[in-house]
Image (cartoon, rainbow, N blue to C red):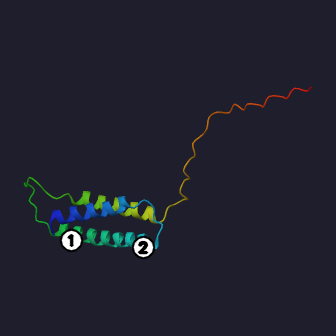
């Protein structure tokens, strides 16, 4: 499998993960689970490709399989953390007014 295929899939995976901000729907969770399965397949293919590679030590360019594995792990952890957050999501803070001066109404004059 060519390097271009790996790069394109990683870019597609990142786009899917970055494009979704909250896993609220069952459909989105299903899609992200599929992304995780595809990451498993890609990692397995990358391992096979690394074992089968016949790059010579004097070659100018070689494919960086360890970096690919790290990137796949990073994407996997991001998706997993999104699907099962370790704690509740923080609330959006409301803006503080900052003005604490309270005007008292003028006292009515007695006749």
* Label placed on residue 48: 1
Q: Residue at x 25, y 57 (%)?
A: 67
Position of residue 89 measured from the top left corner of the image (x, y, whole percent): 53, 57
Apparent side of residue 75 relative to residue 108 in the rendered image (left or right): left
Q: Of label 2 and label 1, which has the lower sequence position?
A: 2
Q: CA distance from mark 2 to mark 1?
A: 32 Å
* Label placed on residue 27: 2
Q: Identify the element where label 1 is drawn.
A: helix
Position of residue 37 measured from the top left corner of the image (x, y, whole percent): 34, 73
Residue 40 location, quadrant: bottom left
How many discs mark residues in the rendered view?
2
Residue 14 location, quadrant: bottom left
Tell me, yes or no, whether the two marked residues, 2 and 1, touch with CB atoms within 8 Å.
no
Please state which of residues 99 and 62 is positioned toward the viewer in this rendering. 99
Q: Residue at x 36, y 62 (%)?
A: 17
Apparent side of residue 27 relative to residue 100 in the rendered image (left or right): left
Give the position of the C terminus as an image quadrant.
Answer: top right
Apparent side of residue 15 relative to residue 111 in the rendered image (left or right): left
Please state which of residues 99 and 26 is positioned toward the viewer in this rendering. 99
Q: Identify the element where label 2 is drawn.
A: helix
* Label placed on residue 39: none
Q: Label 1: few (<14), some or many (≥20) within 10 Å?
A: few
Vertical relation: 58 (above or below) 105 = below
Please identify the residue farthest to the right as the structure is shown: 111
Mark nearest the camera among 2 and 1 is 2
Please state which of residues 25 and 89 is positioned toward the viewer in this rendering. 25
Give the position of the N terminus as an image quadrant.
Answer: bottom left
Position of residue 76 measured from the top left corner of the image (x, y, whole percent): 36, 64
Residue 77 location, quadrant: bottom left
Q: Label 2: few (<14), some or many (≥20) within 10 Å?
A: few
């Amino acid at each position: 499998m060519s390097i271009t295929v790996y790069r394109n899939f990683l870019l597609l995976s990142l786009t899917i993960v970055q494009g979704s901000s909250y896993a609220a729907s069952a459909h989105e969770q299903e899609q992200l689970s599929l992304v995780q399965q595809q990451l498993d397949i890609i990692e397995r293919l990358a391992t096979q490709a690394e074992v089968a590679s016949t790059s010579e030590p004097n070659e100018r360019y070689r494919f960086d399989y360890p970096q690919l594995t790290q990137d796949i792990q990073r994407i996997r952890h991001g998706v997993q953390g999104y699907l099962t957050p370790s704690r509740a999501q923080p609330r959006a803070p409301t803006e503080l007014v900052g003005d604490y001066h309270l005007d008292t109404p003028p006292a009515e004059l007695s006749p």
